[in-house]
Amino acid sequence: MRLTISAVLFALILVLPGAAQAHRISVYAYVEDGQIKGEGYMPGGGKVSNQQVQVLDAGGKVLAEVKTSPEGAFSLPLPQAKPPLTLVLNAGAGHRATFELKAADLGVAAPAPKASPAPAAAEPVAQAVAINQDLAPQIKKAVAQAVAPLRAQLAEMALRSNEVSLRDIIGGLGWIVGLLGLAAYFKARKMAGGAPR
Amino acid sequence: MFGRIVMAVLSLCLLLATPALAHFGMVIPESNLMARPGVINLDFRFWHPMEGQGMNLVKPAEAGVWAKGKKISLLPALKEKKVDGFTTWQTRYRVKSPGDYIFYMTPQPYWEPSEDCFIIHYTKTVVDALEAEEGWDTPVGLPMEIVPLTKPFGIYAGNNFSGVVLYKGKPLAGSEVEVEFYNVGGKLKAPAGAYVTQLVKTDANGVFNWSIPWPGWWGFAALHTADDYKIKHQGKDKDVELGGVIWIYAHPGLSSEKGD
């Protein structure tokens, strides 16, 4: 009995330092221009530098790997796989963080492209034409990239569907002006028709 | 004689009937923690939070969010919403990346006849996204502001909450800080008037401490009469009561045992 208790205590002592994560780590990522961009960080502003980040598909298969920079940042090409993708940041000693990139994140989370997005999107297409073989993945990639903003917009629209935007208001005003114009036209015609010639 | 008694009784009634209501600017997010990027709904109002008595909040002079050292105005995105017949404001904000987001508002001066002064409650609340826990202790730069010394999220009921009161950016000693619970739905009844609005004063360094008795949203309003300007009401100069308000959420305490 006493032996069991000491064994349990010993096990606890072994386990506790790992469990008490005084410095938790987090990983965050978004998709922009066909790249997964992200950061490994700690609460309060610390960065998780030089640690491994893996990208897993829905089945847990490792699709890609990258290391965080000294500033905790990382980026890698977006693997072509069905969402969701899971990013796993491994910092050893039981420090592990995950972040899920859902279907919507593949466009929505990305901030508006800062520079010109055209070259990034155009490049694979140009390559595809030049290589002229094994086109399918290239085209798929290019299409995915081209569609990403659209996807983002759709998700955004779904989100905003219950809100009235400025465009809605202007659109509504347009309708009113149009209908008034139509009414004025018919009225004018009627008046012209009724007027003695 | 009879008339005087009637008058005395009447005025006593009036005096007793005037409830000890404290005004609070309120900025309440749907949650003060976000595990993922996404959209957060926010509620702006001017209220008596413990008594659940509403007031009209005229469209604020400013409403915004501070994040990563930058301010973004949310004023154009504010939408009016009537609650119990009173004007409140709502907005939604898309949080894209980890960090602390401080949502704040500057209301227009509110004329309070019973206190013969104007009231401006600079109000804020902190939302942490994706456990970044960075930025919450930064002053937004409001003329009257509580800067938390206790991390203002991840708080349990029973924890101490500490903050420093800044007036024009400098610690304000001896400032009164009113404390009220946001009594959603009016479920709780204060046993007496004294319990409605609790009060603590700042020490010589402008610091106050408060133990949060039970879970929910708690508001802290540091008050100070503006010492360098007045606002005219019907041609007369009137005092302006400045409030620096912060709202924090306390989670119920955890226990591994059942029944406590």
Image (spheres, rainbow, N blue to C red):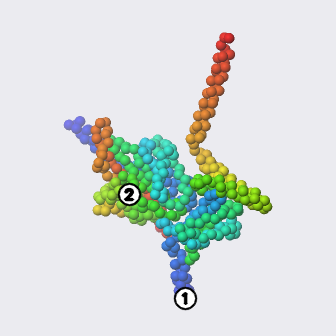
Q: Which mark is residue A3?
A: 1
Q: Residue furthest left?
A: B1
Q: Is B158 in front, or is B3?
A: B158
Residue B217 appears in view? no
Task: Identify the secondary structure beneath mark 2.
Answer: strand
Q: Residue at x 48, y 46 (%)?
A: B75
**Chain bearing mark 1:** A
Name above or below for residue B76 compared with residue B30: above
Q: Residue at x 57, y 42 (%)?
A: A165
Q: Is B65 in front, or is B182?
A: B65
For badge 1, the amino acid type reads: Leu
Q: Residue at x 60, y 30 (%)?
A: A177
The quadrant in which the N terminus of chain A is found is bottom right
Q: In which quadrant of the rendered view does residue A28 lie?
A: bottom right
Q: Mark 2 to mark 1: distance in Å?
A: 55 Å
**Within-10-Å neighbours for mark 1: few <14, some 14–19, many 20+:** few
What is the count of numbered marks? 2
Task: Identify the secondary structure beneath mark 1.
Answer: helix
Q: Residue at x 59, y 34 (%)?
A: A173
Q: Residue furthest front?
A: A130
Q: Is A145 in front, or is A172?
A: A145
From the image, tell me which residue sits under label 2. Answer: B146
The x and y percentages for residue A8 are 55, 83
The x and y percentages for residue A90 are 59, 72
The x and y percentages for residue A131 are 76, 61
For badge 2, the amino acid type reads: Ile
Q: Residue furthest bottom?
A: A3
